[in-house]
Amino acid sequence: MANFLRKAVKQKKEYLIRQLAKPGRLDNLKDLSSYTLSDLEKEHRKLHKLDEVRQRDHKHQL
Protein backbone atom coordinates (compact mmCIF):
# COMPACT_ATOMS: atom_id res chain seq x y z
CA MET A 1 0.00 0.00 0.00
CA ALA A 2 2.83 2.41 0.85
CA ASN A 3 4.42 1.86 -2.57
CA PHE A 4 1.09 2.59 -4.24
CA LEU A 5 0.75 5.88 -2.36
CA ARG A 6 4.36 6.89 -3.07
CA LYS A 7 3.82 6.22 -6.76
CA ALA A 8 0.56 8.20 -6.79
CA VAL A 9 2.21 11.19 -5.10
CA LYS A 10 5.15 11.03 -7.52
CA GLN A 11 2.82 10.95 -10.54
CA LYS A 12 0.75 13.86 -9.23
CA LYS A 13 3.92 15.91 -8.60
CA GLU A 14 5.18 15.16 -12.12
CA TYR A 15 1.84 16.20 -13.61
CA LEU A 16 1.76 19.48 -11.66
CA ILE A 17 5.37 20.26 -12.57
CA ARG A 18 4.54 19.74 -16.26
CA GLN A 19 1.53 22.04 -15.93
CA LEU A 20 3.53 24.73 -14.15
CA ALA A 21 6.41 24.46 -16.61
CA LYS A 22 4.25 25.14 -19.68
CA PRO A 23 5.49 28.13 -21.67
CA GLY A 24 4.27 31.42 -20.27
CA ARG A 25 2.96 29.98 -17.02
CA LEU A 26 5.81 30.91 -14.69
CA ASP A 27 8.25 33.73 -15.26
CA ASN A 28 10.93 32.30 -13.02
CA LEU A 29 10.96 28.52 -13.04
CA LYS A 30 12.38 27.47 -9.73
CA ASP A 31 13.52 23.96 -8.94
CA LEU A 32 9.98 22.59 -8.77
CA SER A 33 11.18 19.05 -8.06
CA SER A 34 12.12 20.13 -4.53
CA TYR A 35 8.58 21.38 -3.84
CA THR A 36 6.23 19.29 -1.76
CA LEU A 37 2.99 18.08 -3.30
CA SER A 38 1.09 20.66 -1.24
CA ASP A 39 3.35 23.47 -2.47
CA LEU A 40 2.88 22.39 -6.08
CA GLU A 41 -0.89 22.25 -5.63
CA LYS A 42 -0.89 25.78 -4.17
CA GLU A 43 1.17 27.13 -7.07
CA HIS A 44 -1.09 25.38 -9.56
CA ARG A 45 -4.23 26.83 -7.93
CA LYS A 46 -2.72 30.34 -8.00
CA LEU A 47 -1.88 30.09 -11.70
CA HIS A 48 -5.26 28.57 -12.51
CA LYS A 49 -7.03 31.49 -10.83
CA LEU A 50 -4.78 33.94 -12.67
CA ASP A 51 -5.66 32.30 -15.99
CA GLU A 52 -9.38 32.59 -15.19
CA VAL A 53 -9.03 36.30 -14.41
CA ARG A 54 -7.09 36.90 -17.63
CA GLN A 55 -9.74 35.11 -19.69
CA ARG A 56 -12.53 37.04 -18.00
CA ASP A 57 -10.73 40.35 -18.59
CA HIS A 58 -10.10 39.44 -22.21
CA LYS A 59 -13.81 38.71 -22.76
CA HIS A 60 -14.75 42.07 -21.28
CA GLN A 61 -12.37 43.86 -23.63
CA LEU A 62 -14.06 42.37 -26.69
Image (cartoon, grey):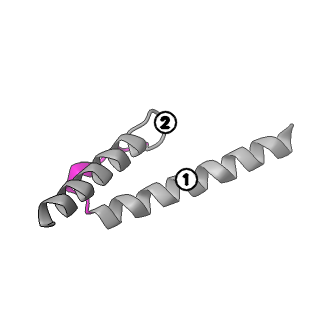
Residue occupying the far front of the picture: 1
In front: 2, or 27? 2
Q: Position of residue 42 (x, y in %)?
A: 42, 64
How far separated are the C-alphas under marks 2 and 1?
A: 13 Å
Q: Residue at x 40, y 61 (%)?
A: 41
Q: Which residues are magenta?
A: 27-36
Q: Would residue 49 appear left or right of 15 to someone viewing this image?
A: right
Q: Amino acid at mark 2?
A: Gly
Q: Is 62 left or right of 36, judged from the image as shown?
A: right
Kindly identify which residue carries mark 1. Answer: 48
Predominant SS of the magenta segment: loop
**Can you give x and y, in whole percent of width and height, for residue 30 in the image?**
29, 48
Mark identifier at residue 60:
none
Q: Are marks 2 and 1 in contact (CB under 8 Å)?
A: no
Task: Identify the residue position indicated by label 2 in the image.
Answer: 24
Q: Quadrant of the C terminus?
A: top right
Relative image position of residue 53 (x, y in whole percent) = 68, 53
Question: What's the residue at 55%, 53% (across, down)?
Answer: 48
